[in-house]
Image (cartoon, rainbow, N blue to C red):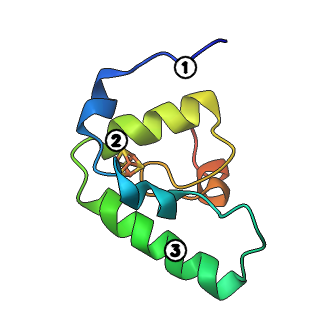
């Protein structure tokens, strides 16, 4: 099984632990209002994260398809130049 390479900045990620659940949609249907609240909670954690720029640069580079990375959701990342 192939694993993703570890990046040094990930050790300083503010989203490690149980709060990581708010960074990705749940497996079941999620209402728009619930998604907005979840994403706001995730983005607030990103705002206080010391590696936000590294995280966003990584997400843009590898074109992460899902979740909040570097304070942006997938739609916002698609509108951001790498
Ligand atoms: S910027 Fe957000 S998603 Fe990226 S490591 Fe920090 S808390 Fe996690």
- Local SS, label 1: loop
Relative depth, front residue between 28 and 73: 28
Relative depth, front residue between 57 and 50: 50
How far is disc 1 from disc 2 in space, using C-alphas? 20 Å
Query: Residue 55, how many percent across, how many down?
Result: 40, 39
Which residue is most to the bottom? 33
For the residues labelled 1 and 2, say whether their Cβ atoms are less than 8 Å apart. Answer: no
Which residue is most to the right? 29
Residue under the image location 23 percent in, 37 percent down: 12
- Local SS, label 3: helix
Query: Residue 64, how many percent across, how many down?
Result: 63, 39
Query: Residue 15, how many percent across, how many down?
Result: 35, 51
In which quarter of the view is residue 1 placed?
Answer: top right
Residue under the image location 30 percent in, 42 percent down: 13
Q: Is residue 81 left or right of residue 20?
A: right
Ligand 1 neighbours mark 3 (CB distance < 8 Å): no
How far is disc 3 from disc 2 in space, using C-alphas? 21 Å
Ligand 1 neighbours mark 1 (CB distance < 8 Å): no
Determine which of the numbered discs, if any, sits on residue 25 in the image. Answer: none
Q: Is residue 9 left or right of residue 56?
A: left
First in sequence: mark 1 vs mark 3: 1
Which residue lies under the disc numbered 3? 38
Which residue lies under the disc numbered 2? 53
First in sequence: mark 1 vs mark 2: 1
Which residue lies under the disc numbered 1? 4
Residue under the image location 43 percent in, 65 percent down: 42
> Mark 2: few, some, or many residues within 10 Å (few <14, many ≥20)?
some
Query: Residue 76, how many percent across, how many down?
Result: 60, 58
């Amino acid at each position: 099984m192939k694993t993703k390479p570890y990046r040094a900045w990930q050790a300083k990620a503010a989203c490690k632990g149980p709060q990581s659940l708010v960074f990705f949609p749940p497996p079941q249907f999620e209402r728009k209002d619930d998604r907005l609240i979840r994403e706001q909670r995730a983005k607030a954690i990103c705002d206080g994260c010391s590696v936000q720029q590294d995280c966003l640069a990584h997400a843009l580079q590898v074109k992460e398809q899902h979740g909040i990375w570097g304070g942006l959701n997938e739609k916002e990342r698609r509108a951001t130049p790498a």
